[in-house]
Amino acid sequence: MAYIILIVVIAVLAVVSAGLLLVRPRLGRGAGTRTLERGRAEQSGAGGATGTLTRGDEAAGAGTAAPPAPPAPPEGELETPAAVAEKPPPSAGRMTRLRARLARSQSSVGSVLLGLLSSGRLDDETWEEIEDVLITADVGVSTARQIVEDLRTQVKVEGARTPAEVRAMLRAELLSQIGEDGNRQLRTRPHGGMPAVVLVVGVNGTGKTTTAGKLARSLVGDGETVLLGAADTFRAAAADQLQTWGERVGAETVRADKEGADPASVAFEAVRKGIEAEVDVVLIDTAGRLHTKTGLMDELGKVKRVIEKRTGVDEVLLVLDATTGQNGLRQARVFAEVVDVTGIVLTKLDGTAKGGIVITVQRELGVPVKLVGLGEGPDDLAPFDPATFVDALLG
């Protein structure tokens, strides 16, 4: 009988144990979940990451942390606006602001001339030395002789000897050679419902594309709207460079969709879009080419003719490197024959003591220097002012 009672007791204990095992998972889904949620809230309040648990994990009482979700933007927060186009300074007064830089590079020529003219004796040997200094400064042989002849006459007539008198005499002579009365104003005003069209030409290495970009920046600074045409289709880098200049000041750039495309068609499309958009200026950068390559020069003439089917070309600016001296003058002659150059842009004028190219190129071509580059900065392209230039030359 005792054995029967023992068997019954063991059976009852087994049934009770089985019941408890069935009830525990249900408790895990209730109170256990609340405990986990409370734990999450405490972790969140303490600045920790919130973990995500699967159902199986909850049942087992263990959690696996998932990567944190990206934080939602605060309510009412706006998206970051696109970059605002720069507002460049106006072109007026740039030459004066850059006068000190120009004076440092040109002072050697001016100081030598002033020293010779102020010396106690002005004999034939001294005058020959003055002529040599002028020729070395790329003034040109005929121009140098003309300047020396004029100065000799003035010294005989006026008897100038003091440094102040000599400086005034030399300043007047140089201004006379450069010419103060010529019209150096860029024609960039729209007319007859059409934008002004400016063509930028020159050989590779003169800073032509950079000049086009700086000019666009200068025009925007003066309050004009500009559209750029990247007609240098032989170099993708040139189109990229021009587009970057345009984007900085909010100017659109028209460019070919492939390298080696017809530059005339790009120029034509730029003018068409400029007319459509009613911009003030369409500024077209052409491919750099050697003045000795007849085929490339003929292509440049074609670009100009194609543009003129829609509207006239208001300015053809030839970019010359001031450090090349007389070689730059030979380039200028050939370009002038092909596209009727209306103005000269002298770059790198701050990097040479040979400022005489200003006088020579104007005398040879009858074309005024309209812009000068005086540094690497984006706003270092300045309208050329003869008086400021000569004052910097003389120091």
Image (cartoon, rainbow, N blue to C red):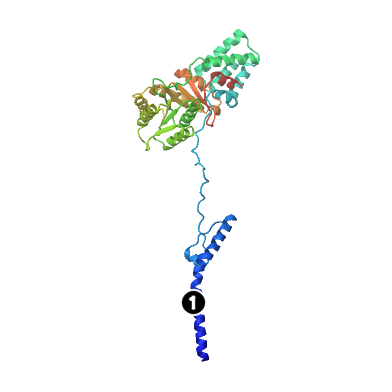
Q: Nearer the viewer, residue 197 or 332?
A: 197
Give the image location of residue 38, x and y in percent: 56, 60
Q: Nearer the viewer, residue 64 or 333?
A: 64
**Any part of residue 199 in sight:** no
Q: Nearer the viewer, residue 63 or 387?
A: 63
Residue extending furthest toward the bottom: 1
Give the image location of residue 313, x and y in percent: 39, 23
As drawn, 167 above or below 99? above
Total marks placed: 1
Q: Quadrant of residue 193?
A: top left
- What residue is at 55 percent from the left and 12 percent from the top? 150
- What residue is at 58 percent from the left and 10 percent from the top? 154
Residue under label 1: 18
Could you say whether the residue bearing mark 1 is in a helix, strand or loop?
helix
As drawn, 354 above or below 156? below
Residue extending furthest toward the top: 157
Q: Quadrant of residue 291?
A: top left
Give the image location of residue 288, x and y in percent: 42, 31
Quadrant, the C terminus: top right
Q: Residues within 10 Å of mark 1 (few under 14, many from 20)?
A: few
Give the image location of residue 346, x and y in percent: 50, 25
Q: Is residue 110 left or right of residue 239?
A: right
**Residue type at the position of mark 1:** Ala
Q: Is residue 110 left or right of residue 263?
A: right
As drawn, 382 above or below 20? above
**Any part of residue 185 in sight:** yes
